[in-house]
Image: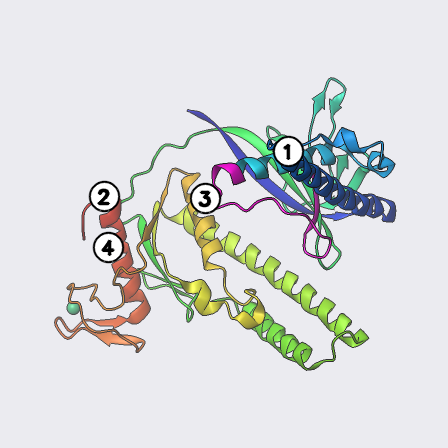
Amino acid sequence: MEEKQYTTIKVRLEPTPAQAELFDKTFGCCRYIWNQMLADEQRFYLETGSHFIPTPAKYKKGAPFLKEVDNQALTQEYNKLSQAFRLFFKHPETFRHPRFKRKKDDRDSFTACNHVFESGPTIYTTRDGIRMTKAGIVKAKFSRRPQAWWKLRRVTVSRSRTGKYYCSILYEYSAEQPERIIPTAETTVGLKCSIQHFYATDGGVLADPPRWLKESREKLAQLQRKLSRMELDSRNYQEAVQKYRLLHEHIANQRRDFLHKESRRIANDWDAVCVRDDALREMAGGALTGGAGSFGYRMFRELLRYKLERQGKSLVVLDRYTPTTRTCSACGYAGEAVWGNTWVCPRCGAVHDREINAARNIKAQGLAQYFGKSA
Ligand SMILES: [Zn+2]
C-alpha cells in the first residue's frame, strides 16, 4: 500500500544582513496581519454574530509595508488563524481561543508554501542554500540531504532567542507501507530507563548518560546560580542571560543528536522494544535548568517509536504502574520495593542487578502485552 509520509529537515541559515533584515520584517508583518485579522474577526462577530476572517489582501492598502515581504507568508497566517478557529470551535476544551501575538512572548517565525510552476518551483534547495521568494538564495548548513524523490512542501523560517536563524523544510514522499514484523523473544529488547543509567537492557547492557551532558548540566546550574545573584538590568546581567541561552541551546542540540543516534541504533538492532511509561521527566528535569537537564526520555521514546514503525517494527509501552523492580525475573516472586543496586530473590536465590531485573520484567510483560496475553 502506498502512503503519504512527511519528514522535516532543520537547517541553520546564514543570511546576509539584508536577508536577515527581510526575515525580521517578515516576522513583524506576520504578527501584524495575524493581529489585524483577529481584531476584525472579533469586531465582526460582535456586530453580526457570525465568524468571518478577512484575507490579507484587505490590509495592504492601509499598510504598504506588507508588500515588501513574501505574500505567501501572509497567506499562511490566514490559514493558521482559520485553522486555530476551526480547532477551537471543534474542541473548545482542548484548544484555546486564538489570541493576539506579542513580540515579547511569541516566537519569531513565518511559513511559506512551495508552488511548482512551469518555470520551476518557488522554493528549492541548492548545494549549500535554500532559494526562497523575495530573499533569493539563503546560505544554509545541511546536516542531512533530502532524497531526490522527496517533494518540498513548505518552509518555516524562525529566529531563536539567541539571534540565530533556522529553517524547517517539510518534505512529502510516498512510501510503501512496511510489512509488519512479528517479534520473537530473541528479537525483542526490554529497556528500563532510569536516572542512574540512561537505560538498562534485559541483556545486561547498562548505558550511562553521556558525560558531556552531565558536565553541561552542571555548567548550566552554575550560570543559573550566578544569574540569581546578579543585579537585574545591569549590562553584565544581560550578557550572562545571553550566555545562558546559548548554553541552553547547545545542550538541547547535543541531546537531540545523542537521542537520534541511540534510538536509531536500537531500532535497527531489534524488532520490538518494550518500555514502561515512566514519569521520568519530573524526576530528571530539574526546575533549575528549565528542562534542559533532563535526558529527554519522552523524546527518546517518540523517536524510537517512529524509527521502529517506519520499519514495520513495534514499540510496546507498559502502563507506568506495571510492577517491574519488585518482581524476580527468574521465578516471578513479587517482593517488597527494592532500593539497593543488587537484589537477592528470597525464593529462588537469584542475584539481580536492580535495573537489569526490571528490564527483563519489562520485556516479559511487553511480549505478553504484544501477543494479547495477560502476564
Ligand atoms: Zn526468584
**Neighbours of disc 2 within 10 Å: few (<14), some (14-19), many (20+):** few
Q: Give the amino acid at mark 3.
A: Tyr
Residue 56 in the image: above or below residue 328: above
Q: Relative to the observer, which residue lies in front, 316 or 86?
A: 86
Rendered residue at 71%/58% (across/down): 161
Pinpoint residue 359: horizontal percent, then vertical percent: 31, 61
Would you name the residue on which mark 2 appears? 371
Mark 2–mark 1 Cα distance, whole angstroms, equals 44 Å
Quadrant assignment, res 51? top right
Whether residue 39 is visible: yes
CB under 8 Å between discs 2 and 3: no
CB under 8 Å between discs 2 and 1: no
Question: In the image, which is nearer the foreground, mark 2 or mark 1?
Answer: 1
Who comes first in sequence, dot 2 or dot 4? 4
Would you name the residue on which mark 4 appears? 364
Mark 4–mark 1 Cα distance, whole angstroms, equals 48 Å
Residue 60 in the image: above or below residue 201: above
Q: Residue furthest top?
A: 118
Question: In the image, which is nearer the foreground, mark 4 or mark 1?
Answer: 1
Who comes first in sequence, dot 1 or dot 3? 1
Instruction: Please tell me whether mark 4 sits on a helix, a strand or a loop.
Output: helix
- Magenta residues, as a range? 88-111
Instruction: Please tell me whether mark 2 sits on a helix, a strand or a loop.
Output: loop
37 with respect to 294 (left or right)? right
Would you name the residue on which mark 3 appears? 306
Q: Is residue 37 magenta?
A: no
The yes-or-no answer for disc 2 within 8 Å of ligand 1 is: no
The yes-or-no answer for disc 3 within 8 Å of ligand 1 is: no
Instruction: Please tell me whether mark 1 sits on a helix, a strand or a loop.
Output: helix
Q: Quadrant of ligand 1?
A: bottom left
Q: Give the amino acid at mark 4.
A: Ala
Q: Give the amino acid at mark 1.
A: Asn
